[in-house]
Image (spheres, helix red, strand yellow):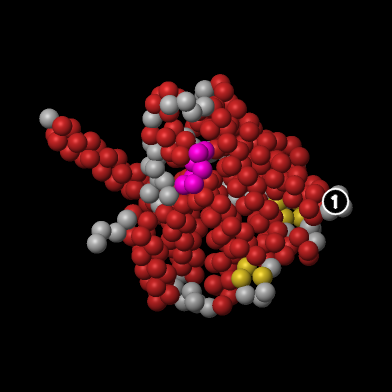
Amino acid sequence: MKLSKESLLGLIAVGTIILMSFIAPGFLSSNNIDNFLFQLPEFGLLALGMMVVIITGGIDLSITYTAALSGVGVALMLTNGQPILLAIVVGISFGLLCGAFNGFIVSKIGVSPILVTLGTMVLFEGIILAITKGQSISGFGETYNLIGNGYYMGLFPLSIIIFVFFIVLTAILLNKTNWGRSVYMLGNNEIATLFSGVKNSRVLMKVYLYAGLLAAISAIIMTSRYNSVKVDLGSSYMLQSVAAAVLGGTNIQGGYGKVMGTVYAVVIFQTISNGLNLLGVHRAIVDVFFGAVLILVLTVNFFSDKWKKNKETKAVA
């Protein structure tokens, strides 16, 4: 029986956990498992947002700064004595506004996603610096901190439950809705999708809005967990989110990507990062490793696609 890419990644994820449990001291300790579970959702949500964008053949380089700006929105409300629910609504609104801004320029004006999001990355960073003056904002209260640090029934981290909810929601949206089917169609062939009656601009706008939403939810979890926010909130996840989406099987040129593949890739990266940290490996080396994995996977995918095209050409001939 031939395993799918996603099933193979699942086995690799299990194998990686087993390997780290043997070579990394304290990997299976309760404190480390808690730390692992609390870090997973913030990274995973950003990776899911990146995956949805990449399926369309685009990329969102501003996703971590969208998260940071959303976190600043939450922080400003909480530190001014506003209710938690209102602060969360404002944070999500900031994320949606950032997503709408990216989506408008990409879908309506037609500028390349990599150029748009590179520009908005700098723009959002500048806005955050102007608001915070480069300082962190902290002190959000114990109730808000429960979102990122609390447990449900004393067993499962609340943030994991939030993550699982968005895993299921993303899978349903991509696989069971007309919008999801249009996302895959757009990534495969933009012209054919347009001629089939799909409004590409509307599909793209919703894609960037959804990425903004997931970035905002990730920001809420991060600000709650750290009890602070600053300009580089989650910035290390930008490269990792691209790497996780690509390792998870998402075609960088668009048209293919599965939620569970990305989730398994997130687990693999988080396991390796956590294990290397326990082994005392410097953070910079971990980033080098992730960069190397991304380049390797992209190279393998490139030659694999090229080989398939050559095979198809010979078959037709």
Asked whether residue 100 is in view, the answer is: yes
Tell me the quadrant of the picture where the N terminus can be found. Answer: bottom left
Is 206 a magenta residue? no
Q: Quadrant of residue 225?
A: bottom right
Dot 1: what SS? loop
Q: Position of residue 242 (x, y in %)?
A: 46, 46
Question: From the viewer's perspective, is 241 left or right of 308?
Answer: right
Asked whether residue 240 is in view, the answer is: no
- Point 63% across, 68% down: residue: 157
Q: Position of residue 201 (x, y in %)?
A: 54, 27
Question: From the viewer's perspective, is 86 left or right of 247?
Answer: right
Q: Name the residue under label 1.
A: 82
Q: Out of 22 and 201, give the one closest to the viewer.
A: 201
Q: In which quarter of the image is residue 66?
A: top right
- Point 33% across, 48% down: residue: 296
Looking at the image, is 11 positioned above or below residue 97?
Answer: below
Residue range highlighted in magenta: 174-180
